[in-house]
Amino acid sequence: MGLCWQEMIAELIMVGTELLLGEVVDTNSAYLAQRLAELGVDLYYVNRVGDNRGRIAGLVKQAYQRADLVIISGGLGPTVDDLTKEAVADAFGLDLVLCPKALEEIEEYFRRLNRPMSENNKRQAYLPKGAVALSNPKGTAPGVLLELPDGKAVIMLPGVPVELKAIMEDAVIPYIRRKLGEKNRAVIYSKVLRFHGLGESAIDDIIQDILAAQTNPTIAPYAGGGEVRLRITAKAVDEEEALRLIEPVEKQLLERLGPYFYGYGDEGLETVVARLLLAQKKTVAVAESCTGGLISHKLTNVPGSSGYYMQGAVTYSNAAKTAVLGVDPELLAQFGAVSRQVAKAMAEGVRQWAGTDIGLSVTGIAGPGGGSPAKPVGLVYFGISYPGGTNTFRRQFAGDRLLVKERAALAALDILRRYLLGSLEEELED
């Protein structure tokens, strides 16, 4: 049998009306969730609530019933709408009392800045009875730790990210580690696999039995930005053990989805393509119509792109396709700009123009107008020219103009990736 660990369940409450109005993006919950996972703490709920004393108190009571540790961010400032401590005191029937240590640290903060302290800053030194202050080296609002008789705890942190992180690293993480104990410590570790060319529902169908059988590790699919990611998460005594648990699940997934897999973690398609181009010492030039330079933009976002990206042409008009890329006007007249024939001529033309190993092209209808029954909005043709031949591909994308452009750019990069891996397939003519 493996080692057991003490379970700890946490819940987050993010306080601030500005979060509900969309005026401020909540980055604190993402940071806190990541740090808790690294400690092996299970996080089941993240809540947001406005600056309302009653609603905050109600949410604290609810979280306290479900979790061992409640962490609250925001509402510790000196103004009248900073109500977190008052709400927590209400939730547990406690008075607010002055903490001399907290007051001394606030006064010292203003002395260091050579600024007078406002009277309302004194409010920040009042804590629920029985709580202790957590020093804030980055601001005036101390964190607050309230341990309750049943062993559960409520921790209040400032909403300013730099202050929250400082107190979390200096005081809260050591506290959680002490609570868990050395022998009972665990980690929650995730590995993200990235796929392109299959939608979320198609992937779900292919791996449905694996998803149904999951326990530890768990698998979570999520889609966005024209791709699908599978996050494999394991809970174990350490990262090494978590990776051992993840490995057979990853192998299963790749056996079924291998042709669509392209990378891990935060690695985008452009990074994977760049690495392949540099390793193979190959160069590329890009001819774009409907994507308006987006493919070139992605390729040159990677440091060192001058080693593989030579030049690009945004040839939106037919005249530009002819003048810059040498596309035959008769092809344009007979088949139209959005066609397999023109995509082929663009790829070959840009490769010859730039003198590169590879020429990559895209031409399509991004919308919202310009479509027809024969050539609907979202229709895109791709070409890739290389020593020995040229391949063309047809894709149909859904979404608005920006989404079609994004999906088309990613599809072009994936075609380039497959070519570099030697897995480029022939496609039937229309």
Image: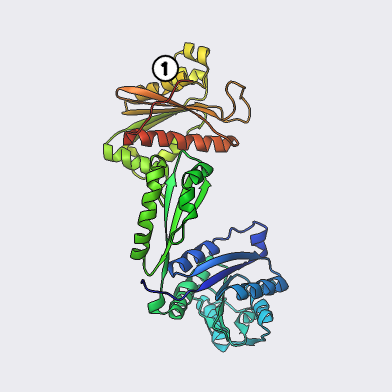
Residue 369: x and y, percent? 63, 27
Residue 301 seen anywhere in this rendered image of the structure: no
> In front: 93, or 361?
93
Residue 82 vertical position relative to residue 240 in the rendered view, above or below? below
Residue 358: x and y, percent? 34, 29
> In front: 346, or 179?
179
Residue 237: x and y, percent? 38, 70
Q: Amino acid at mark 1?
A: Gly
Quarter-of-image position of residue 87: bottom right
Residue 268: x and y, percent? 42, 45
> In front: 406, or 63?
63
Colour scheme shown: rainbow
Residue at x 52%, y 75% (from the top left corner): 113
Quarter-of-image position of residue 283: top left
Callout 1 secondary element = loop
Q: Residues within 10 Å of mark 1 (few under 14, many from 20)?
A: some
Residue ID for mark 1? 326
Residue at x 61%, y 59% (from the top left corner): 24
Residue 270 seen anywhere in this rendered image of the structure: yes
Residue 78 vertical position relative to residue 430 in the rendered view, above or below? below
Residue at x 50%, y 32% (from the top left corner): 291
Q: Tell me if 358 is positioned left or right of 293 in this view.
A: left
- Which quarter of the rendered picture does the N terminus lie within? bottom left
Q: Tell me if 279 is positioned left or right of 72 in this view.
A: left
> In front: 351, or 265?
265
